[in-house]
Amino acid sequence: METNETLISQNTEVLLNLLEELALLEKQSSKYFQKIRKAAFSPELSKALHEEQTGINDHIKRLDLIATELGNNNRTTKTKSSQKLPSLSSYGRKKSATRDLYMISAAQQVIHSKNVYYKLLTRLAIQLDLELGGTLTKQSVSDNEATLTWLDNTAQRIISNEQLILEIPN
């Protein structure tokens, strides 16, 4: 039987590893979403994945706050997440609504992967009695859910051939 101290130590180690992995995945997904934005046929898809809409920069700041709350400000030497992001090259080079649907699916896969990590981080933060950790991770899950909803709606508009003109931020 493991002692409570051992369990706390193990949970803290898992939480720190997940923080590191998720921070790297957030940075990777930011670049990935930028590629999708540039390749998008639909202005709505481009806007849905803009970093102001996805909140990726806020997510990274929240992860840093959780690490600070744990008293761990060490930076990793890793440069990439262990998560492999879906390839965009298989969708061709020509911009089209069909290609956008594939890219929406790829973006949603990435966001769902991030939410799996965030939900586990939430449970660990609550278990470890972190004052901010659980709240901050729940905010990131909420941001991701909003982006998923936007992507779902965009996919439906593309499927229904609805025309929607949006101003796209740079």
Image: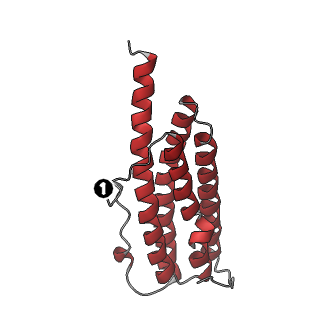
Instruction: Give the colouring mode of the picture.
Output: secondary structure
Residue ranking furthest to the bottom: 94
Residue 60 x, y percent position in the rendering: 51, 58
Mark 1, residues whose alpha carbon is within 10 Å: few (<14), some, or many (≥20)?
few
User: Going 51% across and 78% down the picture, which residue do you hit?
Assistant: 37
Residue 144 visible in rendering: yes
For residue 132, what is the image quadrant? top right
Instruction: Identify which residue is drawn at 59% across, 63% down.
Output: 55
Q: Position of residue 95 (x, y in %)?
A: 47, 86
Query: Quick one: 77 or 15, which is closer to the camera?
Result: 77
Which residue does the image show at 42% across and 45% down from the upper left? 18
Nearest the viewer among 55 and 107 is 55
41 relative to 146, above or below: below
Residue, x 63% and y 57% (percent of image)?
A: 143
Compared to residue 144, the image places residue 163 above or below, namely below
Q: Nearer the viewer, residue 3 or 157?
A: 3
The answer to whether residue 76 is left or right of residue 45 is: left
**Residue 101 vs residue 82, the one in the foreground:** 82
Amino acid on which the number 1 mark rests in the picture: Thr
Q: Is residue 110 above or below residue 124?
A: below
Q: Secondary structure at mark 1?
A: loop
Left or right side of 92 for 136: right
- The image position of residue 22, as x and y in percent, is 44, 52
Looking at the image, is 164 positioned above or below residue 103? below
Write down the residue under mark 1.
Answer: 77
